[in-house]
Image (cartoon, helix red, strand yellow):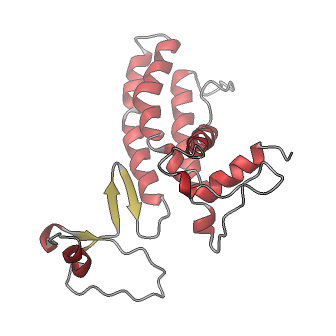
Amino acid sequence: MEDWCLSHGLLLNINKTKCMIVAKPRLSTSISRPLNSVAEMKILGITYDEDLSWNTHTNTICKKAGQRLYILRKMKMLVEKTDLLKIYHAIILGVVEFNNPVYVGINLKNAQKLEKIRKRCHRIICNKECKCNLLESISTRRRIQALNAFKKMMNSDHILHNLIPTLLPRSKHLAMPSCRTNRRLNSFIPCCTALYNSTSTVS
């Protein structure tokens, strides 16, 4: 690490540097000088953990969104349902969907935690007996947003266009990336490739 910094004209400040090792448990890792090792790290608003499970990030945004339900409960006494919907989209959905497309392959347990926030909001805005689909599923919105971002990447001028798999001959489908682990299969590119192929038709 220090050699890389020196070769790129950088100085490594050990006291201000945090290290998170993302590796299989059986792999051994070594660092020439002791760094402050952490199990999770927040970068641009997204919390990554060392096993890339999204558990920590999901818990963080669920806690933050849950704290804002109090506002929704208090405002229910003062405003109409249409205004409550605006409040939901403004202060709660924005938290739950922050960088939503990135973790499109989130596991079922974490997806259910996010859906629980939506259901709690629905009960506040309507009531426990209401069965209408007033608030769209978070999982459905996540897939749509991820697919839209993926389609933008397919533009040859996009900075991430080189990450897009090749188009199969005589087909509108993309070649599915090789995935040896479920972690890889549930990452953004393979997951969006599968979504794209499922929505396209074979010519």
Left or right: residue 8 compared with residue 199: left
Residue depicted at x 24% and y 69%: 18
Residue 138 lies, with reference to residue 177, above or below; the image says: above
Quick one: quadrant of the N terminus?
bottom left
Q: How many marks?
A: 0
Q: Is residue 175 left or right of residue 68?
A: right
* Figure quadrant of residue 8: bottom left
**Quadrant (top left/top right/bottom left/bottom right) for the C terminus:** top right
Q: Position of residue 126 (x, y in %)?
A: 57, 21
Above or below, 142 against 102 in this view is: above
Say if 49 sits above or below 172 in the image. Answer: below
Q: Position of residue 50 (x, y in %)?
A: 41, 70
Q: How far across and down, in percent of the image, does residue 40 sit?
A: 35, 64
Asked where in the image residue 155 lies, by quadrant, the reply is top right
| Residue located 47% across and 59% down the image | 55
The image position of residue 75, as x and y in percent, is 39, 18
Nearer to us in this view, 46 or 200: 200
Q: Quadrant of residue 169?
A: bottom right
Mark yes or no: residue 107 visible.
no
Seen at 22% across and 74% down, the residue is 5
Q: Is residue 169 visible?
A: yes
In depth, the one of 47 and 121 nearer the eye is 47
Left or right placement of residue 19 versus residue 194 in this view: left
Q: Residue at x 53, y 46 (%)?
A: 101
**Is residue 156 placed above or below 36 in the rendered structure?**
above
